[in-house]
């Protein structure tokens, strides 16, 4: 599944949002985000207005990509968990199914151990929803809309040919 197009039904989007809100509450975190590998926000928990989501998504995706490069240099497939500890806030990042990124922002009012414990449970639930989404995409017959376009077609387009 190299060309992965994401289609979320309203029902699935609501289920994902519920999972993220549950994680936020159970881990006593400040915010939870689910991103795609490109940094696009798929969903987030409540009360995330204080964060610049677009910048956060782009920087986290870049961080995951850079860390993937480091992993390869060390002979690893990937590092599936990243953690950044700040003075006041911390970020826990998990790669899910090689296509999604779960981000948890928390502070000193909770512990890393609790966050990791709750994240593990949430990832299991999100994987079920991701598989459901993949099945829905297959049943909707969503395919790569660009698969029948080749380099010659693109050249013609830019030259103004038909």
Image: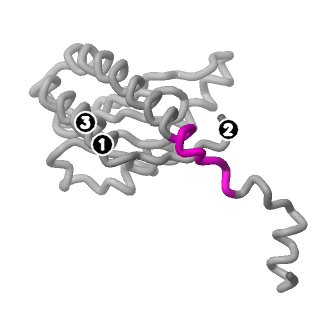
User: Which of pointers 3 and 1 lies earlier in the amino acid sequence?
Assistant: 1
Taking depth in this image into account, of 156 and 40 the one nearest to the observer is: 156
> Crowding near pointer 1: few (<14 within 10 Å), some, many (20+)?
few
Taking depth in this image into account, of 147 and 42 the one nearest to the observer is: 147
Residue ID at (50%, 46%): 6
Location of residue 41 in the rendering, given as x and y in whole percent from the top left corner: 38, 49
According to the picture, the residue beneath numbered tag 3 turns out to be 105
Where are the magenta residues, as a range?
A: 137-145
Residue ID at (21%, 28%): 23
According to the picture, the residue beneath numbered tag 2 turns out to be 2
Mark 1 secondary-structure assignment:
helix
Location of residue 119 in the rendering, given as x and y in whole percent from the top left corner: 29, 21
Majority secondary structure of the magenta segment? loop
The Cα–Cα distance between marks 2 and 3, rounded to whole angstroms, is 30 Å
Mark 3 secondary-structure assignment:
strand
According to the picture, the residue beneath numbered tag 1 turns out to be 11
Figure quadrant of residue 1 = top right
């Amino acid at each position: 599944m190299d060309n992965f197009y994401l289609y979320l039904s309203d029902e699935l989007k609501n289920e994902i949002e519920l999972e993220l809100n549950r994680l936020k509450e159970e881990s006593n975190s400040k915010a939870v985000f689910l991103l795609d590998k490109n940094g696009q926000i798929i969903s987030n928990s409540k009360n995330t207005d204080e964060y610049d989501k677009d910048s956060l998504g782009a920087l986290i995706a870049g961080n995951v990509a850079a860390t993937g490069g480091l992993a390869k240099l060390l002979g690893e497939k990937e590092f599936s968990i990243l953690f950044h500890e700040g003075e006041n806030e911390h970020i826990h990042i998990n790669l899910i199914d090689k296509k999604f990124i779960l981000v948890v922002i928390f502070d000193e009012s909770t512990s890393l151990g609790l966050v990791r414990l709750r994240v593990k449970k949430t990832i299991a639930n999100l994987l079920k929803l991701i598989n459901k989404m993949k099945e829905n995409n297959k049943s909707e017959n969503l395919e790569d809309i660009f698969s029948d376009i080749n380099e010659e077609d693109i050249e013609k387009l830019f030259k103004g040919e038909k």
